[in-house]
Image (tube, rainbow, N blue to C red):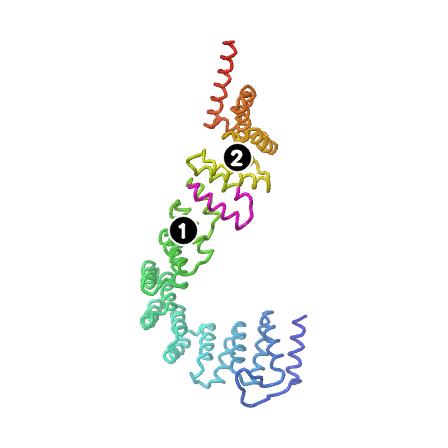
Amino acid sequence: MIKIFITLFLALLFSGCFGGLGSPAPKPYEKTFAEEDIYILFALRAEQLKDYESAATIFNSLYEKSDKKEYLYQSLQNELTLHKNAQVVAKIDAVTDGSMDDFKLVRLKIIALIGDEKFEEARVLAIKLVEKSKEVNDYILVSEIYVKQKKYDTALKYLESAYTKDYNEKILDRMSIILYVNLQRNKEAIAQLETHARIHGCSKIICTRLIGFYSNENNIDSLLSVYLRYYEMEKSDNIAKKIVQIYAYKKEYIKLMGFLEKSKSDNELLLQVYINAKNYKKASKLANTLYEETGDANYLGQSAIFEYESNKNKADKKMQDSVIEKLKEAVSAEKKPLYLNYLGYLLIDHSIDIKGGMKYIREALKLQPNSAFYLDSLAWGYYKLGNCEKAYKIISEVRKLDGGDDSEVIAHEKAIHECINKKNKGKNKK
């Protein structure tokens, strides 16, 4: 439908239904004729629809009616997109009459000449332009022409002389591409980038290029070094993820832990690192922080377990009360068998509330009836109540299950067996 409107608009445009110039001398940011805004809207919409033919026509009409160069540039850009290179050159020549005063038009002409592979003509014009403009992008444009002509060394020398003037990173970036891609002087390309980074800092452009080269070289250590420098400059989650991946790949978990602690980029991963490193004190504290941030009771349960595991004095009443309170809150939110069992076993093992602990164990067994660890906890409850026969019957079944060879299960079996032997000896004495 929009394309139909644009077609109708063009028909009206060529029929001359719109008004003419409002003023012979246009002022910046001021309308020069009544329908100027309508023209702009249709031109921009045509570009969005990739109808570059219509866009070029409308922008050209805007230029003719307003005499604003911005519209001419946009019209020519659309024609370049359509590869109407010769037409672009002709229009620019008609406007400039060989003058070099309008750098934008000269650049567009150079691009059109390159598009038609008139490299020598483009090179001569580009050198003239850069001598007048002294602009970075114009130096790069000259080098691009030399690259098209496969004169890589000349392209490089041209950029080098420009780079030494103000150490512009865009020029260095282009130099590094020519060195690495066209001349296969990989070490030199990397060395120049690293030297610039040491003296002037590893900017986004330089860091990104080094990352590309080191990735291609599969140089993991240097790649990590660049990412770390890049992260210092730009605290990006994506960069942090790359650093984490490399540390994990290198299995440098202490350094990974240090980075995660400093950056706070992934606390969930940091928690796993703490757990793997058996740093339960830090794990408990971080899990509690995650619980406060997310409200996820799973973190509260983890915080409780790690608080208990990190405490050397398991008989510490204050610690026990804290852990029990956390676990009760966690299982009230969601009855996860892991936390039900841990809570129950804690109440049983420290003789705090053996029968109450066994209730939690039975809740866990409803969810996972064949768990060797949960059945072991139940057997331990019966042992603590003095019902060693019942305990022995359960622990005997536990020994047949997966996990039945756990050292704690074996220790419980031994204690239960000794209990039965003592009772039997007592009966024999009677």
* Residue that carries the numbered disc 2 in the rendered image: 342
Local secondary structure at mark 1: helix
Count the labels in the image. 2
Quadrant hosting residue 122: bottom left
148, 241: nearer the viewer: 241
* Residue that carries the numbered disc 1 in the rendered image: 259
Question: Residue shown at 55%/90% (left/top)?
Answer: 24
Q: What's the residue type where badge 1 is placed?
A: Phe
301, 313: nearer the viewer: 313
Q: Please, is residue 119 above or below residue 203 in the view?
A: below
Q: Which residues are magenta?
A: 279-300
Label 1 CA crowd tier, 10 Å (few <14, some 14–19, many 20+): some
Q: What's the residue type where badge 2 is placed?
A: Tyr
Local secondary structure at mark 2: helix
170, 370: nearer the viewer: 370
| Position of residue 378 measured from the top left corner of the image (x, y, whole percent) | 55, 27
Quadrant hosting residue 51: bottom right
185, 349: nearer the viewer: 349
Residue 63 belongs to the span the image colors magenta: no
| Position of residue 345 measured from the top left corner of the image (x, y, whole percent) | 52, 31
Q: Please, is residue 259 above or below residue 113 in the view?
A: above
Mark with earlier residue (1, 2): 1
Q: Please, is residue 114 above or below residue 398 in the view?
A: below
| Position of residue 382 measured from the top left corner of the image (x, y, whole percent) | 55, 24
Distance between the alpha carbons at the discs numbered 1 and 2: 32 Å
Image quarter where the N terminus lies is bottom right
| Secondary structure, magenta segment, majority class | helix
Question: Residue shown at 47%/80% (left/top)?
Answer: 105
Question: Residue shown at 47%/56% (left/top)?
Answer: 237
